[in-house]
Amino acid sequence: MKWSIKQIVENKPWAGWLLFFVTVVFVFFLGLLASSIIERRAEAQFVYSPKVEIEQFEPRNEIWGENFPREYATFLQTADTNFKSLFNGNGLNDALKENPDMVILWAGYAFAKDYNQPRGHFYSIVDIRNTLRTGAPNDTTPSPQPNTCWTCKSPDVPRLMAKMGVQEFYKGSWDKLGSEVVNPIGCADCHDSKTMNLKITRPALIEAFQRQGKDLNESSQQEMRSLVCAQCHVEYFFDNRQGKQKYLTFPWDSGMTVEAIEKYYDNFNYSDWTHAISKAPMLKAQHPDYEVFKMGVHFRAGLACADCHMPYISEGGVKFTDHHVQSPLNNISRSCQVCHKESEEELRERVYQRQRNIKELRTILEKELVAAHFEAKHAWDIGAQELEMKNILLLIRQAQWRWDFAVAGHGNSFHAPLETARILAHGINKAQEARRLLIQIFAKYNNFDVKIPDISTKEMAQKAIGINTQKLKADKEIFLKNVVPIWLKKAKEREAKYSVKYL
């Protein structure tokens, strides 16, 4: 027998009240859902309501900020320099002052003059102008660095590459485009101006993928959230082969491990410089962050650089990417704790423990290398021949390449601590083997009187290798006072002619 609702209510009045309350609750939540949908639509309209039409190669971050004020506001926070962790931070810390051994390791190379821990993207232009490594160019004296050094410093670079051609951009000294490259790393470095999709704007990454038979266009959105960083946070060198001039190239053709990249360089006897003390043909690692990150547990878990260094923010119900690119240690709650439920103190200590362990190995290798360089000099001084020194110099090159590869990356000791420890351990073995062979030479020539000068401070170490820091600083001050203002004036006049179409 089937009863109608009316009959049920007549026979059981409480059922009527139950139905009434269920209906009220259903209507209440339906109302909330409708309200939320309307609110989200309003927010979506508010979130992206473009005010200007952004041109394809618009380099000025503040123009992009007209359409994306939240992202731009967080980008400006990369100017902050107050964060300090156990070994690093975002301030202007003099790495050579903290560790004078690095002056000796880079003797004969520009990094022995000046090397600071990197600050935020906001300072990319200011810091490259200020560093002693780029010299003090003027009308008669060019910079000692090539124009290629601008490549990862500014969204002006894609604009200039499109205008000049890639090889023409790389040609010449660093000062050639001083008035053209003025905007710090920003929006146009990673985004398409029309679709706002992530975009690779530097040719070296595209060309490296092509040589490996890979198509960047097939990369997923999650992969792109690392690949846009990999345009710059990688190992690279300036290729002069086959008519090229300082052509920025990623040495990934044999793989991304420290051994594979070393093999790539060895295949054509490449060296970045000859060491001023030992005369070894050296390699200088740049900052192989992406390569080492790919060897770590977080990459294997599917994370991208942006997950930890640019986590999402929810603000007023709006979700967007934090463009304050920084150490996750300064933002543990929105980076690490999205997955890890331990306290901030526990997570911070886990990172510090890895960093302390790697620092122990790094220091051992640095001391071995410093001694090896001076002992090699002593061997030359007492009459050692090139054939006797060949294998020793090769071991010094291999050991220091491993040291540099391990420490030059900004977060290697955390990104892949096991791999970083393995690399440093092999470096220690090679440096100790070089020193063992050097003792045999000392025995052959019956002279063990190795002299190592006082290199206990940055100033003493630089004096020991003949760097006149006072003159370099004086010349740089003149450059900053007389040349940079002219660059800025020309840039201002040029950008004043850029059209901005307000919608």
Image (spheres, rainbow, N blue to C red):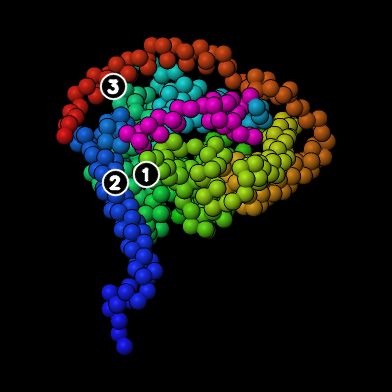
Figure quadrant of the N terminus? bottom left
- Front-most of residues 288 and 140: 288
> What residue did someone put label 1 on?
317
* Residue 367 spot, x, y in % from top left: 72, 36
Identify which amino acid the numbered label 1 is placed on. Answer: Gly
Spatial CA distance of label 2 from label 3 is: 43 Å
Residue 61 is left or right of residue 303, and the answer is left
Q: Which sits earlier in the primary sequence, circle 3 or circle 1?
A: 1
Query: Which image quadrant is residue 213 in?
Result: bottom left
Identify which amino acid the numbered label 3 is placed on. Answer: Ala
The secondary element bearing badge 2 is classed as helix
Identify which amino acid the numbered label 2 is placed on. Answer: Glu
- Front-most of residues 137 and 417: 417
Of the two numbered discs 2 and 3 in the rendering, the one whose residue sits closer to the viewer: 2
Membership of 412 in magenta stretch: no
Residue 370 is left or right of residue 8, and the answer is right
> What residue did someone put label 3 on?
491
Spatial CA distance of label 2 from label 1 is: 9 Å
Q: Is residue 392 visible?
A: no
Would you place residue 293 above or below residue 450 in this image? below
Residue 116 is left or right of residue 166, and the answer is right
* Residue range corresponding to the magenta coloring: 69-97
- Tell me whether circle 2 and circle 1 mark residues in contact (CB < 8 Å): yes
* Residue 311 spot, x, y in % from top left: 45, 44
Q: Residues within 10 Å of mark 3 (few under 14, many from 20)?
A: some
Residue 442 is left or right of residue 47, and the answer is right
Query: Which image quadrant is residue 180 in?
Result: top left
Q: Residues within 10 Å of mark 2 (few under 14, many from 20)?
A: few
- Tell me whether circle 2 and circle 3 mark residues in contact (CB < 8 Å): no
The secondary element bearing badge 1 is classed as loop
Would you place residue 397 above or below residue 153 in this image? below
> What residue did someone put label 2 on?
39
